[in-house]
Amino acid sequence: MRLLVTGGAGFIGSNFVRYMLGKYPDIEIVNYDKLTYAGNLDNLRDIESNPQYRFVQGDIADAAVIGPLIAKADAVVNFAAETHVDRSIHDPGGFIQTDVVGIYTILESAREHKAGKVVLVSTDEVYGSIEDGSFREQDRLDPSSPYSASKAGGELLALAYYKTFGLPVCITRGSNTYGPYQYPEKVIPLFITNALDNLPLPLYGDGLNVRDWLFVLDHCSAIEAVLHRGNPGEIYNIGGGNERTNIEITHAILDMLEKPRSLIRPVQDRPAHDRRYSVDCEKLVKLGWAPAQPFEEGLRLTVKWYVENQWWWRKLKSGEYLDYYKKQYARGFESTKGR
Ligand code: NAD
Ligand code: TYD
């Protein structure tokens, strides 16, 4: 199989490229990525000279470049996106450009070149928050942030391309993912790396928001199942089955690192902060998928990875990262001084 992976230099995409190369001896993968602040070729250093792998730098919204790559591929899996909710609140424009216009460009090119299959990696955040129970694929979309609204926009376009043009697209809605190579703006790597440096851990609101944590390789195996066995025009939820409050996650990280709880700094809540995410994965289980990684062990493994791979994340926490960090957290730290 000749697979085009878009956004393969980010967190989940790079894990997926490595996972697929390790599993399929005959696969050929082209990784097409713009290398935004979140894209990082260090994520794939160990496989960059693999003859079955090739990297091409570019934007998914650039039809002239992505079109010929789609024409040569048997299937496309898109990870490329602007992905961080807090950044989408500061600056929504880039999210609409990549997560909507970029997806439109992939869909148009796939239609023109009669692509075999297109898997769009989306998020459970498109449903919005749920107090009790779990969302199923047919439930109504009610996104809360510019990030999740843009992802919902891309999804709806894809479903329209399936209905109107018969384009064979599948959509996955994964839950919060964690593991090695996650950019240290997301809560788990942010809290691990801050704790290692004895910096405060900015916990939003009351810390009781719930996320369902999915280990990155379980997310990869779910996408693999949808790539091979997903029905065109269908949506598949992917959840880890590990619902935890943010304060539970924070305590677990501090305990694993033997750091004091006094590092926790309650800060102002995120606007429109979804209280709880939860998805029903029965449809994906019927495709033969099940998550394999127990959560506490996965978190321990992740903490260990950040402890042992400081070469990877220390250089990320500079320049643009620090500007963003100041913009995002300075006021929160100021207003809660002494709490
Ligand atoms: P990430 O932010 O780590 O990586 C995104 C990648 O996309 C980067 O390599 C970046 O350079 C690339 N990119 C961004 N804009 C691009 C463009 N216009 N053209 C080409 N490349 C571009 O993201 P991630 O956490 O790996 O998420 C991957 C996908 O999974 C996203 O679509 C996201 O919405 C979805 N998702 C993520 C999570 C999670 O918890 N991380 C959960 C569910 C779904
Ligand atoms: P995040 O990793 O940004 O993922 P998402 O918003 O896509 O779920 O956040 C996960 C949870 O952690 C979410 O409830 C917000 C919370 N959070 C904090 O409390 N402090 C932080 O600094 C960050 C980044 C997130």
Image (spheres, rainbow, N blue to C red):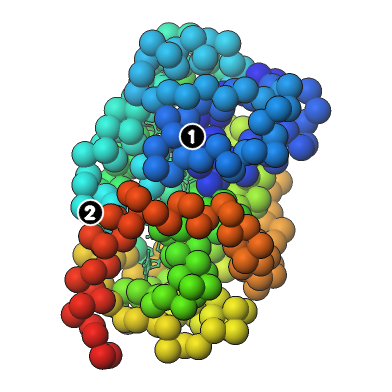
* Total numbered circles: 2
Left or right: 27, with 174 as reference point: right
Dot 1 alpha-carbon crowd within 10 angstroms: few under 14, some 14 to 19, many 20 or more: many
Residue at left offset 62%, top offset 79% = 256
Residue 205, percent across and down?
29, 77
* In the image, residue 179 above or below residue 192: above
Instruction: Kindly identify which numbered label has been placed on residue 136.
Output: none
Dot 2 alpha-carbon crowd within 10 angstroms: few under 14, some 14 to 19, many 20 or more: some
Most foreground residue, 202 or 101:
202
Q: Is mark 1 within 8 Å of ligand 1?
A: yes
The amino acid on which the numbered mark 1 sits, given as a three-letter code, is Gly
- Ligand 2 quarter of the rendering: bottom left
Label 1: state its secondary structure: loop
Q: Is mark 2 within 8 Å of ligand 2?
A: no
**Residue at image mark 2:** 89
The amino acid on which the numbered mark 2 sits, given as a three-letter code, is Ile
